[in-house]
């Protein structure tokens, strides 16, 4: 085996290493699909389902918007 083929092999290994490193930067291992189960609640005024984080809560009931929350307030309570 001559020096040229040794350099060639080292060059190929270097290229493979660089490609794999670049691939890992583009696809980080901890970055999997963020499909967490979202808690949904139902608007007490119109019945629409929405994520709990976006709901307006009042006295343990959830509403899709401020208007419906105000609407719910006018009822008993
Ligand atoms: Zn509503």
Image (tube, rainbow, N blue to C red):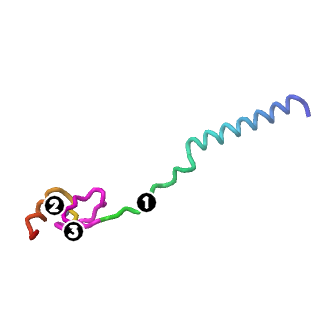
Stretch in magenta? 41-60
Residue that extends furthest to the top in the rendered view of this protein? 3
Labelled disc at residue 69 = 2
In the displayed structure, 77 sits above or below 7; it is below
Q: Quadrant of the C terminus?
A: bottom left
| Residue at position x 57%, y 49% in the image | 29
Mark 3 residue's CB less than 8 Å from ligand 1: yes
Residue on which the image places disc 1:
36
Of the image marks 3 and 2, the number of the one nearer the N terminus: 3
Of the image marks 1 and 2, the number of the one nearer the N terminus: 1
Q: Ligand 1 is found in which quarter of the picture?
A: bottom left
Q: How far apart are labels 3 and 1 at the CA level? A: 23 Å
Mark 2 residue's CB less than 8 Å from ligand 1: no
Of 52 and 11, the residue lying toward us: 52
| Residue at position x 79%, y 34% in the image | 10
Q: Is residue 29 left or right of residue 65?
A: right
Residue on which the image places disc 3:
47
């Amino acid at each position: 085996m001559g020096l040229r083929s040794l350099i060639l092999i080292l060059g190929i290994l270097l290229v493979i290493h660089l490609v794999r490193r670049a691939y890992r930067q583009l696809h980080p291992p901890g970055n999997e699909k963020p499909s967490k189960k979202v808690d949904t609640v139902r608007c007490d005024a119109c019945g629409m389902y929405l994520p709990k984080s976006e709901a307006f809560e009042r006295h343990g009931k959830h509403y899709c918007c401020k208007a419906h929350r105000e609407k719910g307030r006018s009822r008993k309570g």
